[in-house]
Each structure stands twice: as C-alpha cells, then as structure tokens.
Amino acid sequence: MTRHKLRKMRKTKGALFTMRMQDDQYAQFRAVGLLRGSDISNLVHQFAIEQIRREKERDPEAFDAAVKQAKIEIKEHQEKKRAESRNKRLKPLINHAASGTESNTEPED
C-alpha cells in the first residue's frame, strides 16, 4: 500500500459567509455552475471580482475611500470578536479563582 504525500495547503485569509436562497434558486444556481464547469463558490467569486472591477472603473477615488473604511470596520469587528472570545475563555478561570479565595478565608473571631 503506497502512502500519498499530503500537499501543504496554502493558508489564505478570507471571509466565509452564508447566503440564504430559496431551494429553486439554489438548484438553478447550481445548474449554472454545472453548465459552466464550475461550482457555486466560484460563481460567487467571479461575480464579486466583476463588481469590484466595475466600481474601480466607475469612481476609483470613492472606491479607495470605501475600501479604507471597510478595512477599518472589519478590523474593529475582528478585535471585538477576539475580545469576546478571550473574555469567554477567561470567565470560568476568573469565577473559579474568585470562588476559591472565598472558600479559603477563615471567619474572623
């Protein structure tokens, strides 16, 4: 039995999002992908790239300003999520430490 070498996958930062769509629309969109030899993810990517190109051509300065604002908002959102995650992880430790100090104190006479 031969052992296949696992290729290292490139780590890329990216956004993952969920899109709601009716079942019929989903089937039709998937059919478009099949007819084009693609999949839904690639179709969405192609659409996004096309819209970016159009906006850059229409008003480059406004587009650049909007990108800067979007990056600020994304960074703020990521920092907020990190803080919430950190607090969620630390809360049990803080509660445990607080309850431990209270139980170890002896009543004063």
Image: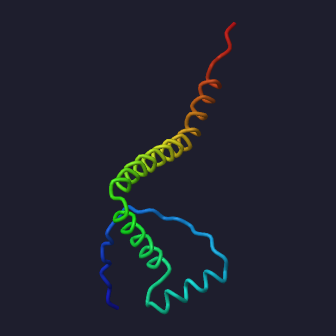
**Which image quarter: residue 97?**
top right
**Position of the N terminus by quadrant:** bottom left
The one nearer the camera, 75 or 107, is 75
Q: Residue at x 45, y 74 (%)?
A: 47
Residue 65 position within the rendered picture, expressed as x and y whole percent measured from the top left: 37, 50
Report x, y in % for residue 17.
Answer: 52, 65
Q: Position of residue 14 (x, y in %)?
A: 41, 63
Please tell me which residue lies in front, 37 or 96: 37
Q: Residue at x 50, y 80 (%)?
A: 40
Q: Residue 21: which quarter of the image?
A: bottom right
* Residue at 43% from the left image edge and 51% from the top image edge: 70
Residue 54 or residue 76, whichever sits in front: 54
Task: Tell me: 41 left or right of 9.
Answer: right
* Residue 25 percent coordinates (x, y): 63, 81
Residue at image coords 60%, 28%? 98
96, above or below 88, in the image: above
Left or right of 3, for residue 74: right
Q: Quadrant of the C terminus?
A: top right
Q: Please, which residue is most extreme toward the top here?
A: 109
- So how many labels did they put on this image? 0
Would you place residue 35 above or below residue 60 in this image? below
Q: Is residue 95 above or below residue 50?
A: above
Q: How is the image coloured?
A: rainbow
